[in-house]
Amino acid sequence: MNHEKILEILHFRHACKQFDPTKIIPKESMGTLLEVARLSPSSFGMEPWRFIVVTNPSYKNELQPLCWNQPQITSCSHLVIFVAKHHSVQDSSYYERLFARRGLAKEALTQYLKRYKSYISSLPSIQEWCEKQCYIAATNMMSFGAILKIDSCPIEGFQKEQLQEKLKLDTTKESVALVVAFGYKVQDPTQKHRLSREDIITWID
């Protein structure tokens, strides 16, 4: 893939507000995107996430009022809800298992665990940290979706407490980080607008 093709893909990706409800993402394509999410990087390799995939039309209708009645909730093919597992990253049986799979020597593993626990204890909000990790997985899904010509829309406009209640989440352990709708657009998007490179990039050579 050349540089021009990469930029073409990034220009294809946009926040799609209206999907064609008659067009359904093929099972293989959605499976690939979910595998992209699963393989996404996360801080310390903690993978503090799980993904709820909604395709049931009736259930999407029930979720729509909790998401500011946005049309993409019901018109999309697949609605993916990114759930942050903030309890898991504090559970020694969880993070010790994840670190152990790296095959580190005992001394190195001990030092790594020490560093991890020190870092976690310094965070002002472990929940927010875990939710940030979900954005990495979501971004990967949207970018790779563009490669497959699948449109998407990241959604932060939702009533968090009500949505978590609807999903029956134990909020002492999990929280909704964001929602992303996937499908196929009804019409081409307007021109993409971004700040110039000069506005946002600083080089230190």
Image (tube, rainbow, N blue to C red):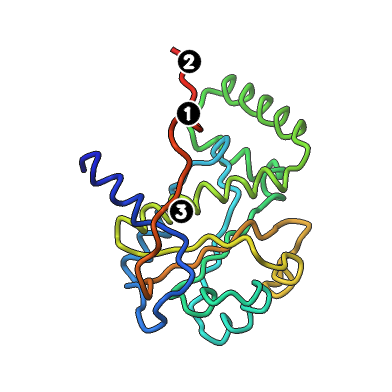
**Residue 37's mark?**
3
The residue identified by callout 1 is 201
Question: Disc count in the image?
Answer: 3
Disc 3 from disc 1: Cα separation: 28 Å
In the displayed structure, does residue 103 sit left or right of residue 98? left
For image coordinates 57% across by 35% down, the residue present is 44
Disc 2 from disc 1: Cα separation: 10 Å
**Pointer 1 local density, CA inside 10 Å: few below 14, some 14–19, many at least 20:** few
Reply above or below: 33 against 203: below
**Pointer 2 local density, CA inside 10 Å: few below 14, some 14–19, many at least 20:** few
Foreground pick, 192 / 16: 192
Image location of residue 27, percent across then percent down:
34, 72
Image location of residue 204, percent across then percent down:
48, 15
Q: Quadrant of residue 158?
A: bottom right
**Pointer 3 local density, CA inside 10 Å: few below 14, some 14–19, many at least 20:** many
Quadrant of image for the C terminus: top left
The residue identified by callout 2 is 204
Reply above or below: 200 against 6: above
Element type at mark 3: helix
The residue lying furthest to the left in this view is: 2
